[in-house]
Image (tube, rainbow, N blue to C red):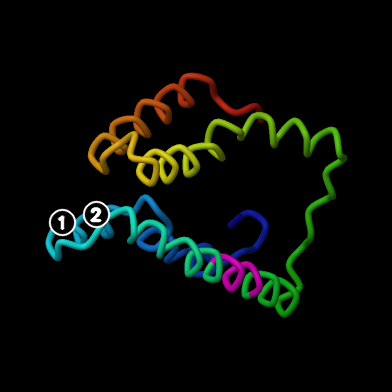
Amino acid sequence: MTANGFLRPTMASMMGPIIPPSIIMVIYGVLSGTSIAQLFVAGIMPGVMLGVGLAGYAWWVAKRKNYAAMKRMSMRERASVTVSALPVLVLPVIILGGILSGVFTPTETCISSRCQNGCGEGFPFPR
């Protein structure tokens, strides 16, 4: 991104502490006695709103500073990228579904998501 003229501060994000599974939510839930599953569910909508806001801000800055636009991907390229990203895209569904259905405890969810993430790392995304 810096090679295309983007400044480093515009690439930062504060979504990590809000989007489930967040270690901050787990620590808060343990210390306060609050349900971690409820905290995860409560973090979904603010995370989506923050994501939309950050995307809008990035668009506004790009238009204002006249950043170069990248070429559009063909539908074939989009489908290929989406299929290669499926293991990562399914992870939040497994985490929240596992906790809310009672299959996993929050601690077990951490281990199961790490296992799935580790399996995904064994198959690098195509460039």
Q: Position of residue 62 (x, y in %)?
A: 70, 71
Residue on which disc 1 sits: 30
Residue on which disc 2 sits: 26
Question: Which residue is found at the position 65% from the left and 63% from the top?
Answer: 5
Q: Main secondary structure of the magenta part?
A: helix
Horizontal relation, residue 94 to residue 32: left or right: right
Residue 104 shown in magenta: no
The quarter of the picture where residue 56 lies is bottom right
Q: Which residues are magenta?
A: 51-56
Q: Nearer the viewer, residue 45 or 3?
A: 45
Q: From this view, report whether residue 90 is shown above or below residue 45.
A: above
Q: Nearer the viewer, residue 64 or 112?
A: 112
Tally of numbered tags = 2
Question: Which residue is found at the position 19% from the left and 57% from the top?
Answer: 27
Amino acid under disc 2: Val
Q: From this view, report whether residue 66 is shown above or below residue 88.
A: below
Q: Residues within 10 Å of mark 2 (few under 14, many from 20)?
A: many
Answer yes or no: do the residues labelled 1 and 2 have beta carbons within 8 Å? yes
Q: Quadrant of the N terminus?
A: bottom right
Give the residue furthest to the left. Answer: 31
Badge 1 marks a residue whose secondary structure is: helix
Residue 52 shown in magenta: yes
Q: From this view, report whether residue 54 is shown above or below residue 125.
A: below
Horizontal relation, residue 113 to residue 71: left or right: left
